[in-house]
Amino acid sequence: MKTRFIATAIAIALAAALPAHAILVNNAADIPLPAPIIDFEAFDELITTGPVMVAPGLAFTGDQGSVLGAFIADLGDNGLWGVGNKFAAGGSIGELRFTLADGLFTRGVGALVNHFAIPAFPFSMVISAYGQNNQIIESYTFSVSTGASSLNDGIFAGILRPQADIRSIAFKGNSLVLDNLTIATPVPEPGTAALFLAGLAVAGYMARRRSS
């Protein structure tokens, strides 16, 4: 009885620590509430590779030529971004990454995105979620086509996990643009609560065993 109880508690704790499969979401409403939105309006054409805090506990890093608070971007056949709406922009070929503070994780994050495209080279984007120790836990490739006459148009692209194990999210692409970064409320390190509860269960069982 004792061995079976302890084995069950350990199995529950290990299951909580296993990687969970994610889904690529295309609607900001799919990100669990409350979901803070970072719109980059507080920045004014800040050219930086970071790190720069864009929200409490959330740091930005990017490639050479990245801009926070950009106000204009020609996306070729994907139209124009700007005109009264600030956003984040990557370099010619690069990355925009957002990383939570140590010990914090989220289960869902995404943003409105687009990228430069021309008929001969439509290009594509990659969205990747990183977990503990900076390892990729999910990655998706997709393209955006919004039309040469579009203005501030794009698609919402995000990753949603069954549990909070995303430490950072990266968007990669050719002259990519990004706005309205939406992130589910960060929580402490995944698995900690399950392991703690399993430990309490084992301790409780042993205490009852001793008292009997």
Image (cartoon, helix red, strand yellow):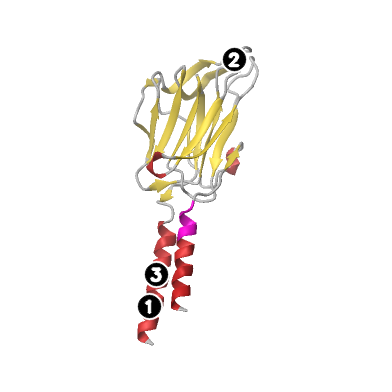
Whichever of callouts 3 and 1 sits on the residue coming sooner in the sequence is: 3
Number of labels in the image equals 3
Residue type at tag 3 = Leu
Residue type at tag 1 = Met
Bin the neighbour count of mark 2 within 10 Å (Cα to Cα): few under 14, some 14-19, many 20 and up. Answer: few
| Tag 1 near tag 2, CB within 8 Å | no
Residue under label 3: 200
Separation of marks 2 and 3 at Cα, in angstroms: 57 Å
Residue 172: percent from left, percent from top? 49, 27
- Give the camera-side residue of 20 and 163: 20
Is any atom of residue 56 visible in this view? no
Separation of marks 3 and 1 at Cα, in angstroms: 10 Å
Query: Could you tell whether 110 is left or right of 209 in the image?
Result: right
Residue type at tag 2 = Phe
Residue beneath the point at 36% across and 79% down: 207
Residue under label 1: 206
Residue 86 falls within the magenta-colored stretch: no
Residue under label 2: 121
Residue beneath the point at 61% across and 17% down: 122
User: Which residues are drawn in magenta?
Assistant: 14-18
Image-quadrant location for residue 50: top left
